[in-house]
Amino acid sequence: MAKIPRAILDAVVDTFVPPDADLATAQAMVATALDGLAPHRRAKLALVLSLLGNPLAMLALAGIPRGFAVLDRPARERALRRLTRVALLRPAIVAFGRLALFAAYSVAGEQGRSAVWERIGYPGPRADVPAGEPFPLAEPPPGGRTAADAVVVGSGAGGGVAAALLAQAGLRVVVLEAGGPFEAVAARQREAEAFAELYLEHGLCASDDGGVSILAGACVGGGTAVNWSTSLRLPPALAAEWGRTLGRPEFAGEIADAYDAVETRLGVTPARAHNRNNAVIAGGCAKLGWSCRAIPRNAECSGDQCGYCGFGCAYGNKRSTAATYLRDALAHGAQVYARTRAERVVIESGIARGVEAVDADGRALVVDAPLVVVAAGALRTPGILARSGVRSPHLGKHLHLHPVTALSAQFDEPVEPWHGAMQTAVCDEFAGFTASADGGVGFGTVIEVSPSHPGLMASALPWEGRDEHATQMSTARHRATMIVIARDRGEGSVGLDARADVRYRIADDDAQRLADGVAAAARIAFAAGARSVSTLHGDPLTLEAADASEAGLQAFAAELRARAAQRAPVALFSAHQMGTARMAASAETGAIDPDGRVYGVDGLIVADASAFPTASGVNPMLTVMALAHRATRALIARGAASSSSGSPAPARS
C-alpha cells in the first residue's frame, strides 16, 4: 500500500486551485480520492509525488534544485508547467490538476454555498427537489445463499431490460448491482458527491496512461441513471452492416422491432426545445446549412430541472431502468441486491449454474440459477467471464471508447450550461453514417453539447497558471461546451484481472477525425455568435471572432490537424465503452453468438455494450436496451421450445 506524501500533495493542490477556493477541503478531498484508488494506480502517483519532494529529482526534471513543497507559488507554477512537458510525468501531473480543480469547484460548505460558485455565477443545488422514495432493495438472504430461475448481473440498460422481460415471463429473477441506489444522492444535487457515489471508480476511471478520462454509471440503473437522456438508434446502414457481419440478414428488422418496444416503454420523444447550450448547435448549423436534428430523449424536462440529471434525476422526469424496467421486474417478484459485486459465474460441465458475489461488507452471496445474464458493462463483463472460466481470445479486446474532446465557446450573452435539458441537438453533417459502395459504414464524428457544472468544466479546461485558469472559469456562465464524438476505428483493451486496466491509444485516423470535428464545431460556434473558442490542448488553441474569417478558420483547422499528427496533448473523454465481448458469427471472431449467448457455455448470455461488433457511432444506451430485449426474447422463446420438447438447447462452440 503506497503512502501518499501528504505535504507534497497539499502543495500541489494549493498550486492548482484558485485563491477563493476552500483550500483545506479541496486538499482533503483529493487525498481521500487518491486513497480510494486501486493500489497500483495509487503507487504510480505516490512515486511522482516522491520525486517532487526530492531536490535532485527536481533539479533534473524541472531545473529547480529544491523540493516542491518549499517553493513559493510562482516557482511551483513554473515547475508544474515544466513537469507536464516530461512525457513520463505528464499523466500524473494532469491527474493531480484535474482532481484539485474538480474539488475546488464542485464542493460547497455546510450552508450549501461556495465562494467560487458566487464568482462564476453557479446557482448550486435547486430548492425545488421533492422528497424521493428510495428504491426498494432486497435484504441479504440468511446464510448468504439463495436460488432463482435467473440471475442478472448489472441493473443498467441491458440488465434492467433483461430482468424485466424474464420476470414478466414468470421466472424468479435476482439482480446483482455493484453500486448503490442513486435517489438520495440525486436529491442533494452535489456534483462532488454524485461523481464519488454514482460513477465507476468514483469518477476517476481512466486509461492506463491517463490519456482518456472514462465516465460510466455505477449505481442502481447504471448509466441510464446518470446519462443525459439521449436515445438514438443505430444508423440503418450500420444495423444492416452488423447483420451481414453476424450472418443474420434479419438482424436489422429484429432490432428495429426491439427499438420500437423499448422506445414505447421509455416514452422516447424528440426534444421540443433547446436550452442556450444546445441552441448554439441548432442555430449555428441552420446558418451554415448543415444537418442537425432534435435528439430523441427518454425524459420530460420541466424548466431548468434537467440540467442536474448527470447526478441522477431527482424529479422523476427521466425514465431510467430504475424508474421503468426494474420496477416492472419488481412488480413480477424480482429481487434487486445493491452494493453486491459479482465475482464469477459458476460453470459446471459447460453449463451455467449461478453466480458468486460479495457485498459491501465483504460477505459472500451465492445465487443458484440455471440462467445467468451478465450485463456489467464493457469494462467489467470481460473480467467476470474470464474469472468464470470462459476462454475466448476476444474477451477484453476490441474496446471502442467513442473518444471525445471538446471546444469551449465563449459568448457575450449568458449560456448557463448547467441549466435545462442536457442534450437536445446533434450535428451529424460529418457522421459518415451512409453506406459506401461496398456496404461498409464510414467512421466520422457527431457534434453535441455537454452540460457543464463547475467541477467538470474546471477539470477539463487547460491549466496554465492559477490566476489564468480562475479568469477562464469566471466566464463559465457565458461558455457553451461543444463535444466532438468520434466513431473510432481503432481498438483498445481492458484487463481481465481485478485491476481491469484500460489500454487505449487513439488511432491516427481517429485523431485526425476528431481534429476535423473540432474545426467544424468552431464554425458552428462562430455562426451562432461566439466571441471566441478554445480547445482542450495542454497548450490551448484559441481563435477570436475577429480572426474567424475563412482564411482564419482554415488556418485553425490546419493547426488542429498538425497537432493531431504530432500527438500534442489534448484532453480526451469517453462516456461510451463497447465491444469487449463482441457478438460474432463464430467463436473464431467473437466471444458471443448473434443472440448474445456465450460460446461454449449453456445458460449464459451477455446483454450490454460489450456485445457490440463495432463502435455504434451514436450514444449506445438505446442500442444496448434493444439488444438486451432481442436476446432475452430469443432466450425466452428457446426456453419455451425446450420445455415443450423436453430437451435443452445445446451449447455453442
Image (spheres, grey):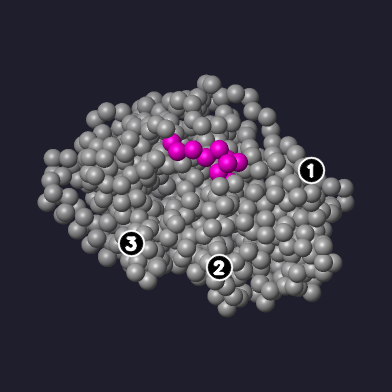
Disc 1 element: loop
> Measured from the top left, where is residue 648 in percent x and y?
79, 68
Q: Position of residue 550 (x, y in %)?
A: 13, 49
Q: Nearer the viewer, mark 3 or mark 2?
A: 2
* Position above or below: 586 against 443: below
For badge 3, the amino acid type reads Ala
Q: Is residue 251 above or below residue 11?
A: below
Question: Magenta region: which residues?
Answer: 262-271
Task: Determine if residue 19 is in view.
Answer: no
Read off the residue under disc 3: 511
Residue 264 magenta-highlighted: yes
State the quadrant of the C terminus: bottom right
Residue identified by numbered label 2: 248
Instruction: Give me the C-alpha separation between circle 3 and circle 1.
Output: 48 Å
Residue of label 1: 333
**Who comes first in sequence, dot 3 or dot 2?**
2
